[in-house]
Image: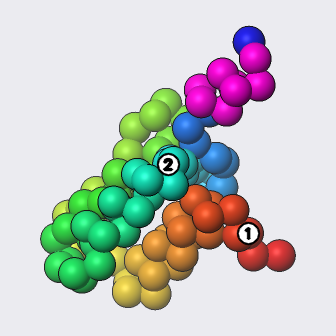
Amino acid sequence: MTLQEKVKARRTRPATVEGEEVFIKVHSGPVLKRMLAQIKGGEDDVVAGVLADQFLDGKGQPVFSKEFFLSEDCPQCFFIELAELFITTNTGVKKK
């Protein structure tokens, strides 16, 4: 397998959320731009749905649901932390 094939095949990056390993989907520049434009309006339902789709478990299943993000069970600070983690992972700007 060539390096380019490896990069194309690896579409997630590992991360830790609340001590649990998760995998964050990574996207190409054009796809990420479209996603950000989609959520820029700030409609809660759209933003929650997009973010919920980005975090996977080891079997490739979503860790969170849109309904969880929209419920009273999800603290706003946690939602913001996940959004920041998704963006930093996809832009290559990791917090040190």
Q: Residue at (30%, 70%) from the top-left corner?
A: 37
Sequence-first disc among 2 and 1: 2
Q: Would residue 77 appear left or right of 34 to someone viewing this image?
A: right
Query: In the rendered view of the protein, which quadrant contains the N terminus?
Result: top right
Measuring from the top left, give residue 92's x and y in whole percent. Answer: 69, 62
Measuring from the top left, give residue 88's x and y in whole percent. Answer: 62, 69
Q: Residue at (59%, 26%) from the top-left corner?
A: 9
Q: Residue at (49%, 30%) from the top-left corner?
A: 59
Depth check, front residue: 1 or 95: 1
Mark 2 vs mark 1: give the one in front.
2
Query: In the rendered view of the protein, which quadrant contains the C terminus?
Result: bottom right
Q: Label 2, label 1: how many angstroms apart (C-alpha)?
A: 16 Å
Q: How is the image coloured?
A: rainbow
Q: Residue at (51%, 48%) from the top-left corner?
A: 28
In this view of the protein, can residue 7 be seen by the observer?
yes
Tell me which segment is drawn in magenta.
2-9
Measuring from the top left, give residue 79's x and y in whole percent. Answer: 41, 77
Q: Residue 14, which numbered label?
A: none
Residue annotated with mark 2: 27
Q: Residue 94, which numbered label?
A: 1
Q: Is residue 8 magenta?
A: yes
Depth check, front residue: 68 or 39: 39
Q: Main secondary structure of the magenta part?
A: helix
Q: Residue furthest front?
A: 30
| Amino acid type, callout 1 | Lys
Q: Would residue 16 appear left or right of 34 to someone viewing this image?
A: right
Depth check, front residue: 17 or 47: 47
Measuring from the top left, give residue 29's x and y in whole percent. Answer: 51, 55
Q: Is residue 85 above or below residue 28?
A: below
| Amino acid type, callout 2 | His
